[in-house]
């Protein structure tokens, strides 16, 4: 079974600074997809970024980028120029066997 | 695209009662998923549908839980004889079903069993 591990229960960052959230996963598959989702206090889960495992190039979406290390099974999220609206729970997720498996999340606090 | 809609937003019930939640996916999304999320945890997979067919159920889904998607559109999740341990957020998500398609989540239904 696939597992996703987020070792940072909480992180904080000064507004306008950069922060990196860690994620590791375990799988025996070679083709899969990885996602970062954001869950603000309003609670709806929102897609932040996705990465196809067969692509070596790291995905980027505006201020959000990933560092995907397939051999190490690592998938970290970097948020640049942090904004107050980035405050939320961030979940790393692995898509395999037709479903998403989530990590336990990292609560990100933005310090004004 | 009006997004995934879940009703009710909140449900408070007494232990032993039955409850039913509804999920309306994004139109033309043929995949529909149910997840459960407890405080401080990530969502846990419960079950998913491809159109009206229920293709997988988690071991978390005990005999007291049943999910349906009768016409391949909306879905219901029923919990019979609720227990305090059922208190959680129940999330519904849908996707077009293509392998790299992200899941789109609803706002969830928060269940409190007293």
Image (cartoon, helix red, strand yellow):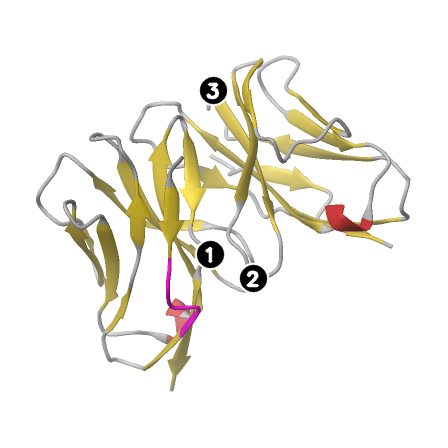
| Res. B45 mark | none
Mark 1: give few (<14), some (14-19) or many (20+) Cα within 10 Å.
many
Q: Nearer the viewer, residue A77 or B72?
A: A77
Which label was assigned to residue B30?
3
- In the rendering, at what x and y percent does residue B60 appear? 63, 36
What is the magenta range?
A6-10
Q: Where, by quadrant of the figure, is residue B74 drawn?
A: top right
Instruction: Please give left or right for residue B65 compared with residue A55 in the image.
Output: right
For the residues bearing labels 1 and 2, Cβ distance under 8 angstroms: yes
Image quarter in which the C terminus of chain B is found: bottom right
Labels 3 and 2: the sequence-earlier one: 3
Q: Main secondary structure of the magenta part?
A: loop
At a point 31% along the width and 26% down the height, the residue shown is B99
Query: Is residue A76 a member of the stretch shown in magenta?
Result: no
Q: Residue at x 33, y 23 (%)?
A: B98
Of the residues tagged 1 and 3, which is closer to the observer? Answer: 1
Above/below status of B9 relative to A80: above
Kindly identify the residue that appears in the image at 53 percent across and 47 percent down: B43
Dot 3 falls on which chain?
B
In the rendered image, residues at marks 1 and 3 fall on the same chain: no
In the image, residue B96 sits, relative to residue B22, either above or below, namely above
Structural distance between the alpha carbons of marks 1 and 3: 27 Å
Query: Which residue is under mark 2?
Result: B40
**Residue B28: x percent and y percent?**
47, 21
Per the model, the C-alpha gap separating discs 1 and 2 is 7 Å
As measured in the structure, the alpha-carbon distance from the residue carrying label 3 to the one carrying label 2 is: 30 Å
Q: Which mark is residue A104?
A: 1
Closer to us: A14 or B82: B82
Residue sitting nearer the eye, A1 or B61? A1
Left/right of residue B47 with respect to residue A21 in the rendered view:
right
From the top left corner, tell me how far across and down residue B52 is, in percent: 58, 13
């Amino acid at each position: 079974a696939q597992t996703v591990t987020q070792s940072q229960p909480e992180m904080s960052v000064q507004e306008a600074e950069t922060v990196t959230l860690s994620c590791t996963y375990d799988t025996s598959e070679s083709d899969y997809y990885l996602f970062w989702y954001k869950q603000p206090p309003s609670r709806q889960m929102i897609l932040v970024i996705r990465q196809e495992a067969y692509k070596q190039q790291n995905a980027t979406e505006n201020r959000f980028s990933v560092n995907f290390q397939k051999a190490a099974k690592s998938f970290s999220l970097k948020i640049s120029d942090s904004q107050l609206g980035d405050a939320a729970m961030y979940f790393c997720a692995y898509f395999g066997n037709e479903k998403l498996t989530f990590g336990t999340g990292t609560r990100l606090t933005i310090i004004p | 695209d009006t997004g995934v809609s879940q009703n009710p937003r909140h449900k408070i019930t007494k232990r032993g009662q039955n409850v039913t939640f509804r999920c309306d996916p994004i139109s033309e999304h043929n995949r529909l998923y149910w997840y459960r999320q407890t405080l401080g945890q990530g969502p846990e997979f419960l079950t998913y549908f491809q159109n009206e067919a229920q293709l997988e159920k988690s071991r978390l889904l005990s005999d007291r839980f049943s999910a349906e998607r009768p016409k391949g559109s909306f879905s219901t999740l029923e919990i019979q004889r609720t227990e305090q341990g059922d208190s959680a957020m129940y999330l519904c998500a849908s996707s077009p079903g293509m392998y790299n398609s992200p899941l789109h989540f609803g706002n969830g239904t928060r269940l409190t069993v007293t």
